[in-house]
Image (spheres, rainbow, N blue to C red):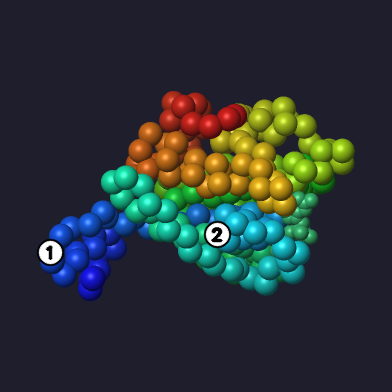
Amino acid sequence: MAQRKMGKEMTVTSDGYHSKPTYVYKVVLLGSMAVGKSSLAFRYAKNSFRETMPTVGCSFFKQMIHLETANIMFEIWDTAGQEKYHSICHLYYRGARAALLVYDISRKETFNRAKLWLRELEKDFLHDEIVIILVGNKTDLATEREVTSEEGKEFARSKGLLHAETSAKSNHQVTDVFMTMPVQSQSWKKSRVDLRAPNSNQIKKCCKS
Ligand SMILES: Nc1nc2c(ncn2[C@@H]2O[C@H](COP(=O)(O)OP(=O)(O)OP(=O)(O)O)[C@@H](O)[C@H]2O)c(=O)[nH]1
């Protein structure tokens, strides 16, 4: 059946039937080098895990999900952890509705650096609203763990972020994290958290922190 797009959101089929609206939901992944950002995006978009090369600049995935009353088109922007790309990747934060701030539970320094990454985000979203999830990746490396779940939760709580732990390798909680962003914030159309209100009720209702 032929379809044409109306603006960003509404699709009208040739018989005049208004199908479910489609909402674009932009997500950025950020965090230190080799914490598993690309692997998380790849696991979510392709349900697969493979050895990845360091990201150059930014890469981009799309993933459509179908809810009862609407579709959500995830635009997933995976940014490079390498310092030299920071200024470029900044440009891609604009318009994001959610951010995954990723660290590696087996490398403490990546957790410590999450504070700096958060400051970067705050520069761009001073007057905007965004859902931020602090994600401790690589839970399959439990024996090498350097950051406890409690430390992760406590830091997230102190900054008003959501918190989750994942493994892109063993596919632990990856889909849950992506689905949390639009769905758990009361309604995905309003899934926004004001950075300047770190302990807002909205955050408390969501997820694990
Ligand atoms: N054990 C384990 N290894 C992982 C996991 N996720 C990613 N890795 C590995 O960690 C390394 C870095 O993964 P990437 O996904 O490239 O990390 P990145 O954060 O995108 O790295 P940059 O592009 O440099 O910023 C690769 O060798 C991955 O195979 C995981 O959940 N568990």
Residue 87 or 161: which is nearer the viewer? 161
Picture disc at residue 153: none
Ligand 1 closer than 8 Å to label 2 CB: no
Q: Looking at the figure, which quarter contains the C terminus?
A: top right
**In this rendering, would 168 be left or right of 193?**
right
Residue 42 locus on image (x, y percent): 62, 60
Residue 105 sits above or below residue 209 on the image: below
**In this rendering, would 6 be left or right of 53?**
left
Q: Quadrant of residue 140?
A: top right
Q: Looking at the figure, which quarter contains the N terminus?
A: bottom left
Report the image quarter containing ligand 1: bottom right
Label 1 Cα neighbours within 10 Å, binned few <14 / some 14-19 / many ≥20: few
Q: Which residue: 66% across, 30% down?
A: 153
- Residue where numbered disc 1 is placed: 16
Q: Residue furthest front?
A: 1
Q: Total of numbered circles in the picture?
A: 2
- Residue where numbered disc 2 is placed: 45
Residue 107 or 48: which is nearer the viewer? 48
Residue 44 locus on image (x, y percent): 57, 55
**In this rendering, would 79 be left or right of 144?**
left
In the image, what residue type sits under mark 2?
Answer: Ala
Q: Which residue: 59% across, 68% down?
A: 59
Residue 103 sits above or below residue 62 on the image: above
Marks 2 and 1: CB-CB under 8 Å? no
Q: Which residue: 53% across, 65% down?
A: 61
Q: Quadrant of residue 80?
A: bottom right
Residue 38 sits above or below residue 141 on the image: below
- Whichever of callouts 2 and 1 sits on the residue coming sooner in the sequence is 1
Element marked by disc 1: loop
Residue 165 locus on image (x, y percent): 67, 39
In the image, what residue type sits under mark 1?
Answer: Gly
